[in-house]
Structures are given as structure tokens and as C-alpha cells.
Image (spheres, rainbow, N blue to C red):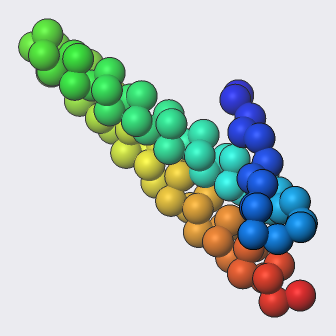
Amino acid sequence: MERFPPILLQLTSEVLTMPGDSHVRAAEFHERAAHAHRSAAVQHGKEDHLTAHELSKQALEHAKKAFEQSQEAHQKSAEKSKK
């Protein structure tokens, strides 16, 4: 799985990294969902609607997981900022 570099903020002298792997996992699921959506569109264009439907279902599952991971990442970020 692809890993993303830490985010650097130039407004402060600190280097902030993404908290834990929550943001990375969310991004990976977003990428998987996008890929499945693109693949489904290609299959629809080829009139292979059964495969396209399966890919659309896959995309929905990845999108749900991305949302869950995003919520978790947001919660962890909020908890960290309170400290």
C-alpha cells in the first residue's frame, strides 16, 4: 500500500505528521473506491453491466470504510489538539 509523506506546515516552526495511520488508511480506502468507480464506468461503457454492478458495490464498500476511517482520524486529531 502506498504511504503518504508527512505534512509540513510553514506557518509554525513545528513539523506536524498525520496522527497515526488513520488518515493514511482513510486515503487508501478513498483511492480504492475511486479506482473501483473508474473501473465500473469502463465496464458500463463496454456494456458489461454485471461486472460494472459488482465493481460499483465494491466502490461503495471502500467508500464506507473510507468514511469510517476519516471519522476516526478526525476524532483522534481533535483529541490530540486538546492536549
- Whether 62 is drawn above or below 48: the answer is below
- Image quadrant in which you'd find residue 20: bottom right
Q: Nearer the viewer, residue 18 or 12?
A: 12
* Numbered label tally: 0
Please give the name of the residue rendered at 64% of the width and 71% of the height, measured from the top-left corner.
74
Q: Is residue 7 visible?
A: yes
Outermost residue toward the bottom?
A: 82
Please give the name of the residue rendered at 38% of the width and 29% of the height, measured from the top-left corner.
36
Q: Position of residue 51 (x, y in %)?
A: 26, 19
Please give the name of the residue rendered at 68% of the width and 55% of the height, measured from the top-left corner.
23
Q: Nearer the viewer, residue 34 or 65?
A: 34
Quadrant (top left, top right, bottom left, bottom right) of the C terminus:
bottom right
Q: Position of residue 7 (x, y in %)?
A: 75, 53
- Whether 62 is drawn above or below 36: the answer is below
Please give the name of the residue rendered at 82% of the width and 71% of the height, measured from the top-left corner.
12
Q: Is residue 64 left or right of residue 83?
A: left
Q: Position of residue 66 (x, y in %)?
A: 53, 52
Q: Is residue 50 visible?
A: no
Q: Position of residue 44 (x, y in %)?
A: 15, 20
Quadrant (top left, top right, bottom left, bottom right) of the N terminus:
top right
- Image quadrant in which you'd find residue 55: top left
Q: Nearer the viewer, residue 13 or 31?
A: 13
